[in-house]
Amino acid sequence: MAVAELTSPASAYTHTTTRLRSSSQLSLSSTHLSLRFRRSFSPRNTTITCSINQVQAPVPVQTQKPKDKSECFGVFCQTYDLRAEEETKSWKKLINIAVSGAAGMISNHLLFKLASGEVFGPDQPIALKLLGSERSFQALEGVAMELEDSLYPLLREVSIGINPYEVFEDIEWALLIGAKPRGPGMERAGLLDINGQIYAEQGKALNAVASRNVKVIVVGNPCNTNALICLKNAPNIPAKNFHALTRLDENRAKCQLALKAGVFYDKVSNVTIWGNHSTTQVPDFLNARINGLPVKEVIKDHKWLEEEFTEIVQKRGGVLIQKWGRSSAASTAVSIVDAIKSLIIPTPEGDWFSSGVYTNGNLYGIAEGLVFSMPCRSKGDGDYEIVKDVIFDDYLLKKITKTEGELLAEKRCVAHLTGEGIAFCDLPEDTMLPGEM
Amino acid sequence: MAVAELTSPASAYTHTTTRLRSSSQLSLSSTHLSLRFRRSFSPRNTTITCSINQVQAPVPVQTQKPKDKSECFGVFCQTYDLRAEEETKSWKKLINIAVSGAAGMISNHLLFKLASGEVFGPDQPIALKLLGSERSFQALEGVAMELEDSLYPLLREVSIGINPYEVFEDIEWALLIGAKPRGPGMERAGLLDINGQIYAEQGKALNAVASRNVKVIVVGNPCNTNALICLKNAPNIPAKNFHALTRLDENRAKCQLALKAGVFYDKVSNVTIWGNHSTTQVPDFLNARINGLPVKEVIKDHKWLEEEFTEIVQKRGGVLIQKWGRSSAASTAVSIVDAIKSLIIPTPEGDWFSSGVYTNGNLYGIAEGLVFSMPCRSKGDGDYEIVKDVIFDDYLLKKITKTEGELLAEKRCVAHLTGEGIAFCDLPEDTMLPGEM
């Protein structure tokens, strides 16, 4: 994935937030006016007023540099009675969604998809909590201004900040895109360390202030190991709730199988990406299906499947950068939307989706304690189960063993960030996906 | 609006297209296999085959430079029987949508919104026809690759090309974003001329090959005068079908009125942008309403309305560029979606929307023969009517007269492109919106 930006772990954290709370968090006897204090890391005021007769309460737009005290952003500072709207419009309760790397290009696509209702549906009001860095704070304001100007009715709060302990408060979804790109001459171990530190800090913040059932999707690379670091630093949140994004790889694999088979992509199903989001990833053509038939029965060119298919999928991002001059922000954002929808909409009968998930208790004999992409199904409740009925052959097992070995090496390399002792880096060759760091 | 790129009027036009036609354009007795020739500017093959039992028909991905002959793009080359799917899924007939400046940032947001079904609905399959320049052709391929990888079920065709006479064939919507940015030292008259030539060419192409009822939304600046040039070069298409985008200005005005009044933006209605998409634009606070009341009854600070409001709206794009480091592509794309939806969904009772439309026959006494932003209503049939029940005061009339004067001057400056004689440029001060050229 293209990286958006560094989410600085600096100490000078500040936060700008909207103070409205959804009705679920309130115990109001009147819809007209209330005042409420809430304590988490710091006491704060929450003002709720009814918008129906309420006018003439101008609030200054936040245009300064980050401040120590929390302030709301722009038009989203307007207070109103969301409960009344929920009742009138049969809306669901507001949900809080945090996005890190919020000033980057992937987020610039994703935030508008979230705000439009495309992801969570037309009856789901949302609050967006944008996490950036001190360096990107002005850009975050720019993003918030564009969200204001978009007049999305479901977008009820926007807050921006650079302190994950404030931004992640009460969130139900964490979409972690921010990561630092590799600088000139930086070793892979150095990159694992610097991004690992960011994800360790964000894991701690999630552990401290997020909803106890927050769902976390890690996009910033190296995403599997970042997700592992994140979950290890959030012991009070179920490890099962953490995902590393391999959905773009799955989507690309489906498209290439469709292209080779001469069918439209909606005819391809049951595609698994196994393992690491890197060049060792394993797009599984053994279990994949086209028009319900095994791929190998449909695509007779098995040499292509074994020798070219995987490489085409892996190199897709690099080819795109050559063509387009930048990394694939739009399709990455689409794949994040797909990943969220796969958890909140029941998986179609007989099909599955890929996600990098915690390996403890997996049925395949993959080493425990990794974040490893596997086939999953969901009832649409935000949770998932690993699919049982897959088959393996020697080719697939050999590939899976290789990507497993890479993830084990990455894990050893970040042991200091997962509380598992002293790091020892013996990474094999550089297997980062081209242009996605 | 930020410009995407130059759509070159060069002669070396080529085109890559998918050859599938929707069932409405076919007269097949079988869904299994058919072959059809179609003549427009050049005879071409159209192959329709049924996908149900169809496999093993690999088609090479288009990766070369533009060619003279037409070819389809990637997975969208796959042939299939859309009519069967239309029947099975109760889908509407495929519609063809062209987007110019397709490799630019606004399009990079817009194309994915179109493909996702957010604009035309979940039962409307679409064909996207991307118009770029020879220089941007590889970037167009990159965009098409990202659209492939997004696996949008409704996106049934993607074609890319640099010849508007091919790209615009049979299109029902033309979203014209491409325009050339002003070079160093370029006079405004020079910019009007160079972009006017592009829009004259595209008008001729629309006139020659587009659907006779194509709806055209011009975004590339100066959008009002570009739209005028375009419609003057397309005499066989109703002038009423051409729009210049002022919806982003309207959205920004609504947001600022909400902010000042202390209400959420969904409480603001009946906002008109009058005139030119430039600094002479007139955001109308006289007719606008907040919670159903006239704005001036709600916002008592009339000095702010008269002296600050308009400038804030006009300068919003410039402030955003300062903050965000680039122009407002995402919210521009949102406003294009809003503009389309305003024509295909009935306007809510009592409300209206702004669009730059042809002034012939207008009720307000605005000079005829201009593209001028005015309040419109639609029954949702793609057509619109100009709203009758608006009021004027001296302040508003004076402002409208000024923006009308500017558009008349722009029109004199492009007379050579509208078939109205010899151009005479006496443009007043430079009123381009900051950062939007």
Image: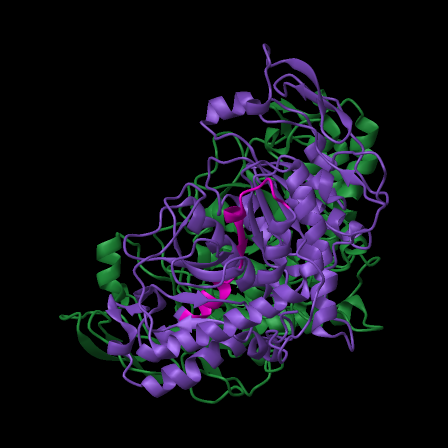
Chain colours: A green, B purple
**A290 or B352: nearer the eye?**
B352
Q: Is residue B183 above or below residue A42?
A: above
Where residue A264 appears, as percent x and y from the top left, is: 64, 30
Q: Find the magenta span and give its range.
A: B234-253
Q: Residue furthest front?
A: B421
Residue at image point 63% right, 60% down: B220
User: How many numbered circles are shown?
Assistant: 0
Q: Is residue B53 above or below residue A130?
A: above
Image-quadrant location for residue B325: bottom right
Q: Is residue A407 above or below residue A341?
A: below
Instruction: Point out the image quarter for the C terminus of chain B.
Output: bottom right
**A346 or B205: nearer the eye?**
B205
Instruction: Point out the image quarter for the N terminus of chain B.
Output: bottom right
Residue at image point 77% right, 34% down: A395
Lateral position of residue A125 relative to residue B128, left or right: left
Where residue B109 appears, as percent x and y from the top left, is: 59, 56
- Within the magenta stretch, is there residue B10? no
Image-quadrant location for residue B302: bottom left
Q: Is residue B401 above or below residue B343?
A: below
Q: Residue furthest top?
A: B29
Lateral position of residue A402 relative to residue A160, left or right: right
Q: Is residue A361 visible?
A: no
Where residue B189 appears, as percent x and y from the top left, is: 71, 70
Q: Is residue A188 visible?
A: yes
**A302 or A370: nearer the eye?**
A302
**B134 or A291: nearer the eye?**
B134
Image-quadrant location for residue B214: top right
